[in-house]
Each structure stands twice: as C-alpha cells, then as structure tokens.
Amino acid sequence: MALLVKDKSVVVPGEELAAGMDYLPTSGTYRDGDKIVASRLGLVHVDGRLVRIIPLSGKYLPKRGDVIVAKVIDITLNGWRCDINSAYSALLGMKEGTSEFIARGADLTRYYTFGDYIVAKITNVTSQNIVDLTVRGPDLKKLGEGRIMRIDPNKVPRVIGKAGSMVSMIKLATDCRISVGQNGVIWIQGEPVKERIAVQAIEKIESESHISGLTELVKQFLDEQVKVKK
C-alpha cells in the first residue's frame, strides 16, 4: 500500500510505481493486479492519489483549447495556413483571424503574411486531424519582431511553472516579453543581451526539468547572468 518510486524520478516502461489500491493510474500508467506500472519512459508525477508519467520527449499533438504560437506558412482563399510545430498544419479562417469584415477577394496579407507569428487558440481538432485556430480572444494576437525558440512540448509546463511562476521570474529578470505556446514554440522580445539570457534560462529548464529545486537553480542562474551583463 505504498509508492515505490519518488515523485519526479525517471522511470522506464514496465517499472512498478505503486503497490496496493491507494493510488490510481492515469496517463502513461496502467494497473497490473494490485500494482501500478509505467507504460512509457518519463517522469513520475504524483498528484494526491493520481500517478501519471510525463513523457521526456515527443511531438506536439494538438488539443482543443490549447494556446499555441503558430507561424503563417500559406495564404488560401479562406484564410491562413499555419505551422504549429506538429505533424499537422492548422487553418486560421478569415472570421477567426479578425473581428473586421473581410470582403471576398480582399488582400489577406494586410492582416497576416508569410512568416508572421501569432498567439492562437485551437478551437477544433477533427478525427482527420484538421486543426482550426482563432485569434479572437484575450491575449490572442499577432506577434511583432522577436526571437523564436522551440522546446520539447512536454517541458512547457516546467517553463511556465505553477500559476506562471517560472516564466514570470524570467520576464522580470530579463525585462523581456515572452509568449510560451503549449506546442513548444516560444517568442521572446527584448534587448539582444537580455533575450539571450532568457533563451539560456529556458534551455536550462528544458535540460534539467527532472531536477528537484529547479526554480531556485534558475533564479540563481538569472541573478548571476543579469549581474554579469550590467
């Protein structure tokens, strides 16, 4: 009737995580008799009685409601085709791209053009993996000039932190504007030197996401880097 591994420890498929019926298997785990077993490689996450595995790597799988950073890669008669850092592209329709009325045949590059980055929300994912986007909503918008970086989508929760604590700490230390997409695409805008510090901090979080006390390590890193650059 006990947990057999520590929270945030790395486990492999087939490894026993808990014994007894006190814990419940969720994502990345399954029950085998009275034991909970890992079905994938990843980090153990225990939330109350729930045990799940956070994958260490993987491609982004679009989900309805996700807020992502997308890149405009094509313009169609009906809107804009976007790269969402997935095996599938997405469509931002004219009605979802702006609150303005767009006449048929209008020049859509007035709104978004090739290479533009946007913060968008996924409104629908069909069984054929057709993905629809919207930028009509709070904090959804076209992004300006800035630096783009990509991380493993599974590490995004660590970069954001609890209630946004980690990314807020990076913003405050570097005075950068940062948008973190749940698809692992991140936009950063600030002074070039400060942008680099923000990138390095995010890379540190991605590579050390399995380490306990990560917030303190990142804070120490930021304090050191910002002091050196002053």
Image: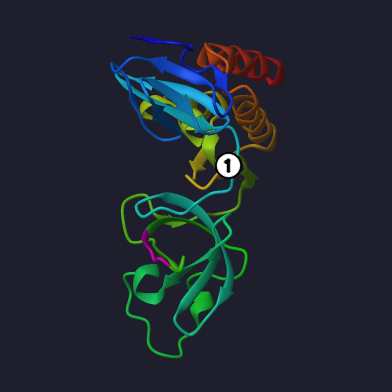
> In the visual, does 86 lie left or right of 79?
right
Q: Residue furthest bottom?
A: 105
Q: Position of residue 54 (x, y in %)?
A: 49, 31
Residue lying at 49% horizontally and 79% vertically, measured from the top left: 108
Residue 169 shows in this picture = no
Vertical relation: 144 (above or below) 182: below
Quadrant position of the N terminus in the picture: top left
- Depth check, front residue: 17 or 183: 17
- Depth check, front residue: 203 or 50: 50
Q: Name the residue beneath numbered marker 1.
A: 188
Vertical relation: 101 (above or below) 168: below
Element under disc 1 = strand
Residue type beneath disc 1:
Ile
Neighbour class for label 1 at 10 Å: few (<14), some, many (≥20)?
A: many
Q: Position of residue 93 (x, y in %)?
A: 41, 73
> In the visual, does 9 lie left or right of 196?
left
Residue bounds of the magenta highlight: 123-127
Residue lying at 51% horizontally and 16% vertically, measured from the top left: 215
Q: Position of residue 141 (x, y in %)?
A: 42, 57
Q: Main secondary structure of the magenta part?
A: strand
Which picture quadrant has residue 204?
Answer: top right
Vertical relation: 30 (above or below) 2: below
Q: Is residue 80 magenta?
A: no
Residue lying at 48% horizontally and 85% vertically, measured from the top left: 77
Residue 222 shows in this picture = yes
Q: Position of residue 188 (x, y in %)?
A: 58, 42
